[in-house]
Image (cartoon, grey):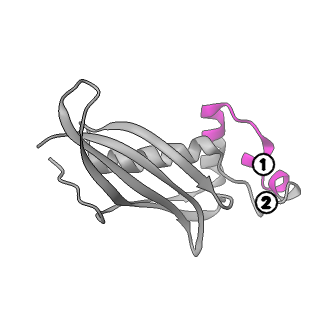
């Protein structure tokens, strides 16, 4: 059973963000905006390349938190999330976090547990396009 502490590192979760992956994500969540699947359309709109949509960003935060917290964890909240720049295709993506707060809290079924707030950051090289928070609940040890 995980015993989290403030300052503990979460992740990293990394992947190469290919255009193929963005096309698959767009099809899965039915977001067919050209800027998410076509580099030229993205450039016409002012972006350097095709970029991830907000559903992808939220999914990566969810994946980071639940892979770290384990199968008995319950995702309580994602957000606020601030997008400072585009999450671009053709770059390596790293999603990491740091535990910011740990408090005792009842779970969805009333069992005692721990609520963990995590500050999340996306990195693509030197760029930091996304920052946000997420909250998970884990059962007591």
State which tag comes first along the sequence, 1 or 2.
1
Picture mark count: 2
Tag 1 secondary structure:
helix
The residue at the point 18 percent across, 50 percent down is 2
Q: Quadrant of residue 119?
A: bottom left
Tag 2 secondary structure:
loop
Q: Position of residue 44 (x, y in %)?
A: 88, 56
Q: Is residue 129 left or right of residue 11?
A: right
**Label 2, on which residue?**
47
The residue at the point 37 percent across, 38 percent down is 75
For the residues bearing labels 1 and 2, Cβ distance under 8 angstroms: yes
Q: Quadrant of residue 127?
A: bottom right
Q: In the figure, 115 relative to 5: above or below?
A: above
Q: Position of residue 41 (x, y in %)?
A: 84, 51
Q: Using the rendered image of the protein, determine whether residue 37 is visible from the camera's viewpoint.
A: no
Q: Magenta residues, as a range? A: 24-42
Q: Is residue 69 left or right of residue 62?
A: left
Q: Quadrant of residue 54?
A: top right
Q: CA distance from mark 1 to mark 2?
A: 8 Å
Q: In the figure, 138 relative to 44: above or below?
A: above
Residue 36 forms part of the magenta stretch: yes
Which labelled disc corresponds to residue 35? 1
Q: Is residue 84 left or right of residue 32?
A: left
> What secondary structure is the stretch in magenta mostly built from?
helix
């Amino acid at each position: 059973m995980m015993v989290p502490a403030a300052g503990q590192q979460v992740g990293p979760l990394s992947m190469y963000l290919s255009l193929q992956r963005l096309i698959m994500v767009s099809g899965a969540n039915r977001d067919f905006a050209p800027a998410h699947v076509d580099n030229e359309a993205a450039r016409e709109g002012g972006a350097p390349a095709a970029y991830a949509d907000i559903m992808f960003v939220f999914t990566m935060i969810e994946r980071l938190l639940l892979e770290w917290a384990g199968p008995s964890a319950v995702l309580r909240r994602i957000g606020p999330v601030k997008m400072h720049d585009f999450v671009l295709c053709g770059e390596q993506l790293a999603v990491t976090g740091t535990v910011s707060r740990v408090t005792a809290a009842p779970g969805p079924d009333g069992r005692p547990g721990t609520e963990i707030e995590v500050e999340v950051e996306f990195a693509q090289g030197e760029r930091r396009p996304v920052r946000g928070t997420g909250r998970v609940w884990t059962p007591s040890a």
